[in-house]
Image: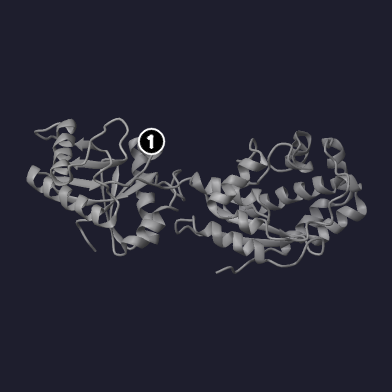
Amino acid sequence: MDTNKPILVRYGEIGVKSPVVRKRFEKKLIGNIKKLIKCKITINQGRIFLFPEDHEKALKSLKKIFGVVSFSPTVSTDTDHNSIKETVQDYIKELMEKGDFDSKKPFAVKCRRVGTHDFSSREMAGFCGAAVIELTNAPVDLSNPEFRLFIEVREDKTYIFHQKIPGPGGLPIGTQGRMIALVSGGIDSPVATYLMMKRGCDITILNFNNHPYTGGSNEKIIKIYQKLKEYASGSELRLYQVNYGNFLKKCTEEAPPRMTCVLCKSGMYQIAEKIAKKEKALAIIDGSSVGQVASQTLPNILATRYSTSIPVLSPLIGLDKTEISEIAEKIGTFPISILPDSGCSAAPKHPETNAVLENVLEVQEEIEMDEELAKVISSLHKIIAE
């Protein structure tokens, strides 16, 4: 562990919370970091400093920890002019050897200062810039530099770096309660789940096995689970499944064919609500986007959610397929979601797109939906996906 090369970690909206909430969120973020990275941590006025055992592993892990806005590998030194000059020049020499600094290209120095000192931020930036020029004779361009050197002065310690690596942002997982995420092998629901994890939610994934109307393999859902788990920040990401094929058979045989998708989605919400009580979850997450498929028209959204009393959150509700796919590609679920599968053969050729609530409730009663869903819940089982 090199105590002179800490990683500086920045967070965003945590910093504007009330003092009590901010302290709690900071504690949770630090705890999540420590679950993934063996390190010592200090915190100083809105900055977290990591002293990891494995530097490269830490940099890789920080890219997937929610609450981290950005981070920088740094070199630290004492806050005095001689030490800072020597450290800056050694830092630039090392970058030149790696090919990361070109003395022919313009550079700039930006300084941020916290505490009481006998110099201003502008004066320290000028001092460090002069040290770089003395060493390299590189040109300066404060408006449009090709290389930026950052100096962060914090009381008696100064940190020097040139990278600001983006983190995922959001809130630390574990600050907003648990939710039930309805996740299939498609593109949308894994993205919706990711976005709510980003808002600090612990997640229980619920998958519906529609066999024999779909293939019986769990390969895709396990792969999606494993990809999402990379962003779980050490939180327990649970994966459950229910057998849904018999309920779909009941719908296709005893209900109007056009209504199969509406009954299917309504049943999913009702089952999720019952499981939410067992999981102490506060809401349901799904991948709905208005008008994208038959069950996601506004009349159908009303009809399918009517029998559910806890909130159903749809973070993709205003996004189109292109926007959703771009996020899926970014987080790594897209290549999994587009793996070939058989689709659902229970879906009718002409599904209902303008469901009338009263009619839906009447059909639910006719097919004894409560009793059928109780059978589905009895099939609940955990999928081991390690």
Mark 1 lies on residue:
17
Closer-to-camera residue (4/178): 4
Q: Quarter of the image containing the C terminus?
A: bottom right
Judge whether 189 appears above or below 12 on screen.
Answer: below
Name the residue furthest front: 104
Using the image as rendered, state which of residue 81 and residue 235 is in the foreground. 81
Image coords of residue 373 (percent x, y): 77, 55
The type of residue carrying mark 1 is: Lys
Counting from the top left corner in percent of width and height, residue 331 is at 54, 52
Q: Can residue 47 be seen in this view?
A: yes
343 relative position to 15: left or right: right
Q: In this view, does 103 lie to the left or right of 234?
A: left
Q: Where is residue 337 in the image (x, y as percent from the top left)?
A: 65, 56
Name the quadrant containing residue 124.
top left
Q: Is mark 1 on a helix, strand or loop?
A: loop
Residue at x 52%, y 59% (from the top left corner): 229
Task: Mark yes or no: residue 115 visible.
Answer: no
Write the residue at 70% across / 43% down: 308
- Disc 1 crowd rating (10 Å Cα; few below 14, some 14-19, many 20+) is few
354 and 176: which one is in front?
354
Seen in the picture, residue 18 relative to 196 is either above or below; the reply is above
Quadrant in the picture for the N terminus: bottom left
Q: Please report the residue visible at 52 percent of the width from the left and 49 percent of the height from the top.
A: 197
The image quarter containing residue 116 is top left
Q: How is the image coloured?
A: one colour
Residue 218's place in the image compared with 205, above or below, is below
Q: In this view, does 174 lie above or below 106?
A: below
Identified at 84% across, 49% down, the residue is 260
